[in-house]
């Protein structure tokens, strides 16, 4: 089982990479980047591209405070990002974003953001390289995260009723920011202090074929930082026509993870989602770094079926994990509740590892031959 667990853990870290020190001194050809000694010279590869704040990226659209971007198509071909937002009170409504090298929509270090009824597709296939193998610290010139919709260091935000498909680096990411910036090329300057996340809703989105990254991720990367009060509700996640794309597998799944040392991901509601045929477990709650914790995570009323094929035959519907192989380094899953879910076509309906077993009740679970409804170790 230990070998299989390590295999499973590796797969589910496709879009949750470890924190590393920021290096300097790199030149990146293409994708609009030229970075030397942690300075950026922006090189637009299309006339519409413009500098995106201090991110080191170019963007087709750079939002301003209070702006409503609505009823338009953003063709970001040749730009690093489709729409870049670092100002508050911005609404993106009924917009199609396509063609960006990295994130389709990148929002960072701001608040009061709405992304709704938009289509984000065809982005992230020409981003700077992600760490390989998955789960290793990023090095100079690499870009750790580039979700189709990326919210890094963003509070009081709603991402609702969007269609997110055929992107090269995952679906929707909600993460903290700070000295480690998950959405910045390693080697560029970052921030001297932690930027926590609070009050984010991700609801009623449809996601499929988002490769080399999870469908929906909530994670804290920076040492001692917090991500709290995030609701992930009524989303539909399914596999597309192909399980693998040009950048990696169609990972799918919903993940809540404390990924930074002594970080906390707390008060997370994962409810009424439908997750089917994901490469990783349908829902994963993971305390993944020394001294870190997930706290008050509730997984309820979800429909999960046929997930976890990357770890077949030991597929899993819900995973609650607080082990860092090979040692227990003080990480914990505190007050996790798994209740009223309908789970089918999995080898393990609920798989949990670590001293902090979740409270499990009133789930309907159907397993494949030889499997178990609940497996604890």
Image (spheres, rainbow, N blue to C red):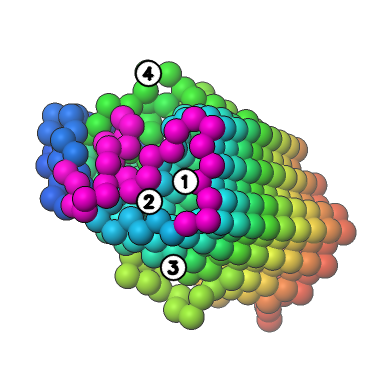
Boundaries of the magenta span: 43-72
At mark 4, the secondary structure is: loop
Q: Nearer the viewer, residue 53 or 148?
A: 53
Whether 182 is drawn above or below 282: the answer is above
Q: Nearer the viewer, residue 16 or 171?
A: 171
Q: Which numbered dot is residue 362? A: none
**Residue tagged by mark 4?**
192
Q: Nearer the viewer, residue 134 or 290?
A: 134
Query: Mark 1 and mark 4: span between their CA atoms?
Result: 21 Å
Mark 2 or mark 3, earlier in chain: 2
**Residue tagged by mark 2?**
82
**Which residue is drawn at the image coordinates 63% and 43% (left, top)?**
158
Whether 360 is drawn above or below 366: the answer is above
Mark 4 or mark 2, earlier in chain: 2
Near mark 3 (Cα within 10 A), the count class, few <14, some 14-19 or many ≥20, is many
In front: label 1 or label 4: 1
**Residue tagged by mark 1?**
150
Image x and y of residue 162, in percent: 58, 58
């Amino acid at each position: 089982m230990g070998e299989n667990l390590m295999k499973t853990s590796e797969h589910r870290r496709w879009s949750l990479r470890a924190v590393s020190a920021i290096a300097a001194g790199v030149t990146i050809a293409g994708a609009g980047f030229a970075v030397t000694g942690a300075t950026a010279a922006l090189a637009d590869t299309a006339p519409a591209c413009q500098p995106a704040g201090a991110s080191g990226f170019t963007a087709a659209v750079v939002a301003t405070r209070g702006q409503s971007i609505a009823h338009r198509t953003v063709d970001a071909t040749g730009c690093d990002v489709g729409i870049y937002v670092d100002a508050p009170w911005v609404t993106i409504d009924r917009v199609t974003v396509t063609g960006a090298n990295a994130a389709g929509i990148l929002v960072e270090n701001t608040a009061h953001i709405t992304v709704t009824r938009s289509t984000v597709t065809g982005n992230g296939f020409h981003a700077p390289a992600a760490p390989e193998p998955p789960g290793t610290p990023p090095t100079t010139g690499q870009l750790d995260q580039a979700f189709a919709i990326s919210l890094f260091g963003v509070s009081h935000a709603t991402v609702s009723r969007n269609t997110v498909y055929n992107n090269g680096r995952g679906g929707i990411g909600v993460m903290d920011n700070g000295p480690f910036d998950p959405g910045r090329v390693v080697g560029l300057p970052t921030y001297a202090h932690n930027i926590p996340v609070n009050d984010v809703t991700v609801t009623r989105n449809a996601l499929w074929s988002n490769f080399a990254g999870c469908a929906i991720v909530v994670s804290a990367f920076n040492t001692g930082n917090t991500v709290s009060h995030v609701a992930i509700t009524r989303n539909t996640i399914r596999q597309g026509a192909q399980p693998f794309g040009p950048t990696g597998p169609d990972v799918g799944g919903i993940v809540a993870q404390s990924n930074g040392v002594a970080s906390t991901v707390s008060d997370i509601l994962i409810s009424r989602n439908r997750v089917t045929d994901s490469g990783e477990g349908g829902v994963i709650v993971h305390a993944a770094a020394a001294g870190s914790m997930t706290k008050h995570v509730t997984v309820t009323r979800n429909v999960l079926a046929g997930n976890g094929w990357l770890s077949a035959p030991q597929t899993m519907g819900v995973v609650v994990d607080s082990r860092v192989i090979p040692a227990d380094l003080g990480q914990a899953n505190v007050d996790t509740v798994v209740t009223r879910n309908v789970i089918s076509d999995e080898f393990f309906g609920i798989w949990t590892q670590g001293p902090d077993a979740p409270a499990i009740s009133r789930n309907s679970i159907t397993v494949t031959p030889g499997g178990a409804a609940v497996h604890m170790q």
